[in-house]
Image: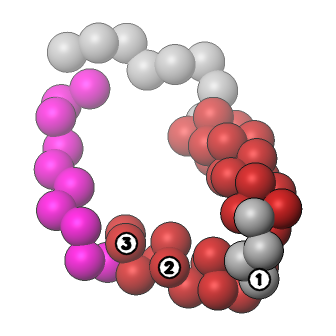
Amino acid sequence: MTDAPAGSAADFLKPRVEALMKEAEAAGYSRSRVLAVLINLLETTELEDTGQ
């Protein structure tokens, strides 16, 4: 088992999600549509815990 990183998962993910949102909006997708798709992907995608 590895040591936990110093920051929180939210601190790690927030800038990446914000960048993804900006990129999607620049491509013409509405913020609400992108959020809906992200939520759907999280709910329907098989994400397994790899122990890391």
Q: Is residue 32 above or below residue 29?
A: below
For label 3, count other residues whose C-alpha is less than 10 Å away and answer few (under 14), some (14-19) or many (20+): few
Task: Write down the residue under mark 2.
Answer: 37
Q: Is residue 28 above or below residue 50?
A: below
For label 1, count other residues whose C-alpha is less than 10 Å away and answer few (under 14), some (14-19) or many (20+): few
Marks 1 and 3, the one that precedes in the sequence: 1
For label 2, count other residues whose C-alpha is less than 10 Å away and answer few (under 14), some (14-19) or many (20+): few
- Are dots 2 and 1 in contact, CB under 8 Å? no
Residue 18 at what x, y percent from top left? 77, 53
- Are dots 3 and 2 in contact, CB under 8 Å? yes
Specify the segment rendered in magenta. Answer: 43-52
Element marked by disc 1: loop
Number of numbered discs on residues: 3
- Image quadrant holding the C terminus, namely top left
Is residue 14 visible from the viewing direction of this image? no
In front of the other: 46 or 50 = 46
Task: Write down the residue under mark 3.
Answer: 41
Residue type at mark 1 is Ser
Q: Residue at x 62, y 78 (%)?
A: 35
Is residue 28 visible from the viewing direction of this image? yes
Marks 1 and 3, how far apart at CA: 17 Å
Give the number of the disc on residue 30: 1
Residue situated furthest front in the rendering: 27
